[in-house]
């Protein structure tokens, strides 16, 4: 006879096979921003923060924020903020409005690091004061140790073939970043003049991005495509490079897989969203793929949904011989997706897909 503990253990093993990382569970969000301020610029930073703070207070979904200064090193600051849930924060932080808001900070800040957390448990007065329907994350999510991120940008019409050749012919950088971080996979896709570069990193994403940017072979590729970009950039100018990569960032908002499935075939689909509808569209696609991976007969083995403003990209690994369908088969779900589209959902052309040895 199977005991209760054995049944619970078996259930835990089954749950652990399913990896799900999502911003769409509705729980409250805590954002932690670590800031390194130039020596002597503390007062300038404080004034810039106070101006930013007043603007952020009116952003939908914002609850509160707090500014702290290190007692050991006055150049180190900590900003924490609370949001009703992740989607309103991501909608704001990935917007042109946010890019403009933080510009006054650039001249006094040497470096920043942003961390985002769903609130799982809390104690004391904060819990008693919880109101307005704000929720805690109900249970811990199971991850696979891989961070997924993407960049997207457009090139000048008529240069697509030249850009595709440059992006396909580069030499892969060293996969090992440090003792704890390594590059796992890079996938490049294009549709029309839009480029999407999806990367997978085990360890520290920021360390990996900086590592890649320093590699001569990658620097050569970036310099080679510079003349063809619609948004001008100068990689030797810190402000120009920062502006470009801030606008190009395409964060993952949902990832789901069952970890005993085969690798499959990788495809990417591009969904141009109506203005202001990107996050809602991403959520619909995330829900569809979450259900799909639980179906042993479905073609989708794993899925990552990326979103920034009106650009939504769905990266899927499929069973061999299958193609990704841009719209759900269910008529109601398909209609809901179409309602949020500004154009046709399309399958992107694969330029290159590289896995690092040992990844």
Image: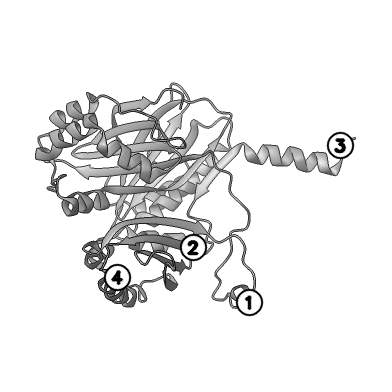
Give the residue number, with chain letter if any, for mark 4: 42
Q: Between 192 and 21, which is closer to the camera in this rendering? A: 21
CA gap, disc 3 to disc 1?
41 Å
Give the residue number, with chain letter if any, for mark 1: 128
How far from the left and from the top, in percent, is residue 4? Answer: 84, 44
**Disc 3 versus disc 2: nearer the observer:** 2
Q: Dots 3 and 2: beta carbons under 8 Å?
A: no
Position of residue 85 relative to residue 244, above or below, is below
CA gap, disc 4 to disc 2?
28 Å
**Disc 3 versus disc 1: nearer the observer:** 1
Q: Which mark is residue 29?
A: 2
**Is residue 191 at least partly visible in the picture?**
yes
Q: Residue at x 52, y 25 (%)?
A: 262
Position of residue 30 relative to residue 244, above or below, is below
Q: Residues within 10 Å of mark 3 (few under 14, many from 20)?
A: few
Closer to the chain start, of discs 2 and 1, is 2
Closer to the chain start, of discs 4 and 1, is 4
Q: Secondary structure at mark 3?
A: loop
């Amino acid at each position: 006879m199977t005991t209760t503990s054995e049944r619970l253990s078996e259930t835990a093993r089954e749950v652990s096979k399913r990896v799900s990382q999502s911003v769409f569970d509705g729980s409250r969000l805590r954002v932690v921003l670590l800031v390194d301020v130039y020596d002597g610029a503390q007062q300038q930073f404080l004034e810039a923060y106070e101006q930013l703070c007043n603007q952020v207070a009116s952003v939908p979904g914002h609850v509160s924020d707090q500014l702290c200064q290190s007692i050991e090193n006055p150049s180190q600051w900590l900003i924490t903020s609370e949001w009703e849930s992740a989607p309103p924060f991501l909608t704001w932080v990935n917007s042109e409005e946010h890019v403009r808001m933080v510009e006054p900070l650039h001249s006094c800040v040497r470096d920043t690091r942003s961390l985002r957390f769903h609130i799982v448990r809390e104690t004391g007065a904060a819990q008693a004061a919880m109101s307005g329907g704000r929720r805690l994350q109900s249970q811990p999510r199971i991850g696979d140790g891989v961070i997924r991120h993407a960049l997207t940008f457009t090139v000048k019409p008529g240069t697509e073939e030249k850009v595709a050749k440059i992006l396909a012919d580069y030499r892969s950088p060293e996969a090992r970043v440090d003792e704890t971080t390594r590059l796992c996979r890079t996938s490049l896709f294009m549709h029309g003049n839009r480029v999407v570069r999806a990367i997978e990193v085990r360890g520290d994403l920021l360390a990996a991005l900086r590592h890649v940017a320093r590699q001569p072979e990658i620097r050569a590729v970036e310099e080679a495509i510079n003349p063809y970009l619609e948004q001008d950039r100068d990689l030797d100018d810190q402000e120009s490079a920062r502006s470009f990569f801030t606008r190009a960032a395409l964060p993952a908002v949902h990832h789901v897989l069952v970890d005993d499935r085969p690798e499959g075939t990788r495809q990417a689909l591009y969904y141009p969203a109506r203005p202001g509808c990107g996050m809602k569209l991403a959520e619909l696609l995330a829900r569809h793929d979450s259900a799909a991976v639980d179906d042993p007969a479905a073609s989708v083995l794993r899925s990552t949904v990326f979103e920034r403003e009106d650009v939504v990209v769905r990266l899927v690994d499929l069973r061999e011989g299958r193609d990704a369908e841009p719209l759900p088969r269910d008529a109601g779900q398909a209609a809901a997706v179409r309602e949020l589209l500004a154009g046709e959902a399309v399958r992107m052309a694969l330029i290159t897909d590289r896995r690092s040895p040992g990844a």
